């Protein structure tokens, strides 16, 4: 691997080195996402604190596991269609549903995280922009179960992306990871800050600094 590639990888992992607006621009964000000016104000108002521990966090729902954010994916709005299917129908184009059901069986994703096109629904995953583990350690550990279920299925925090990039992100925060496509840095930061503000979650100092750097270059 060349030195230039190694430097680029290091910048991506560190969550810095982005020039917002460069790369493959993608303006699509979930309904309810705040604008840049609002995101800057909201970020400044978030409590800065070291993250809490992961004691008690169990995402698994099988075999009597704690399932602290509820079983994926719930139909929290009661419209008869689970949140995953709603996000796929919202974010993909050329959507074909299963007969008599809301589940999506075909569609094309223009992945905002990579700028690539994904033509197989099986290779698409739904990302929690603010990861559930991060919600837990920044405030959600003290919530009642119903609030955690609502947050886990909040459409404002859900984006359809290529499965492998979602796996690469894991539970990392913006000081540790940003979308490989710099053209989505600004929308990603706006989504992230808006969700943290909506749920009164804290940020660590390095997380806030990374988001400030991104938002400073956003229109």
Image: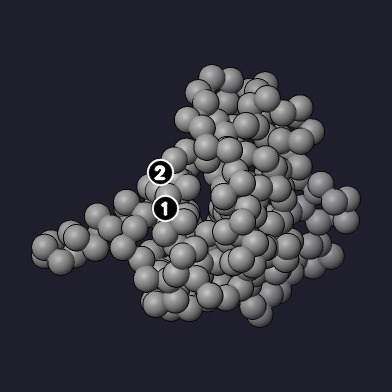
Q: In which quarter of the image is the N terminus?
A: bottom left
Residue ID at (31%, 63%): 17
Q: Give coordinates of residue 165: x percent, y percent.
A: 43, 57
Q: Residue furthest left?
A: 2
Q: Give coordinates of residue 18: x percent, y percent.
A: 36, 66
In-front residue for pair 68/101? 68
Q: How crowded is mark 1: few (under 14 residues within 10 Å), some or many (20 or more)?
A: many
Q: At numbered mark 1, what does the secondary structure look like: helix, strand or loop?
A: helix
Would you identify the image quadrant in which residue 121 lies? bottom right
Figure check: 121 above or below 60: below
For residue 131, say whether it is visible: yes
In-front residue for pair 142/110? 142
For residue 134, say whether it is visible: no
* Residue, disc 1: 210
Figure check: 194 above or below 131: below
Are dots 2 and 1 in contact, CB under 8 Å?
yes
Rendered image: mark on residue 82: none
* Residue, disc 2: 206
Q: Give coordinates of residue 123: x percent, y percent.
A: 50, 61
Q: Is 201 left, or right, of 74 in this rendering?
A: left
Figure check: 96 above or below 48: below
Residue ID at (47%, 30%): 50
Residue ID at (15%, 66%): 4
Would you identify the image quadrant in which residue 95 lies? bottom right
């Amino acid at each position: 691997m060349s030195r230039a590639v190694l430097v680029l990888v290091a910048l991506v992992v560190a969550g810095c080195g982005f020039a917002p607006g460069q790369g493959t621009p993608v303006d699509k964000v979930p309904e309810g996402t705040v604008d840049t000016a609002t995101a800057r104000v909201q970020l400044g108002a978030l409590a800065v604190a070291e993250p809490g521990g992961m004691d008690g966090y169990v995402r698994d729902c099988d075999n009597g596991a704690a399932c602290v954010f509820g079983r994926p994916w719930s139909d929290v709005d009661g419209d008869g269609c689970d949140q995953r299917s709603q996000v796929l129908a919202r974010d993909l184009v050329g959507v074909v549903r299963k007969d008599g059901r809301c589940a999506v069986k075909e569609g094309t994703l223009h992945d905002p995280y990579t700028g690539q096109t994904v033509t197989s629904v099986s290779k698409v995953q739904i990302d929690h922009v603010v990861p559930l583990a991060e919600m837990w350690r920044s405030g959600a550990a003290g919530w009642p179960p119903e609030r955690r279920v609502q947050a886990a299925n909040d459409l404002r925090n859900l984006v359809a992306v290529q499965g492998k990039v979602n796996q690469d992100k894991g539970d990392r925060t913006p000081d540790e990871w940003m979308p490989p496509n710099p053209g989505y840095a600004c929308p990603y930061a706006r989504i992230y800050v808006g969700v943290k503000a909506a749920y009164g979650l804290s940020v660590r100092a390095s997380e806030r600094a990374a988001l400030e750097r991104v938002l400073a270059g956003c229109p």
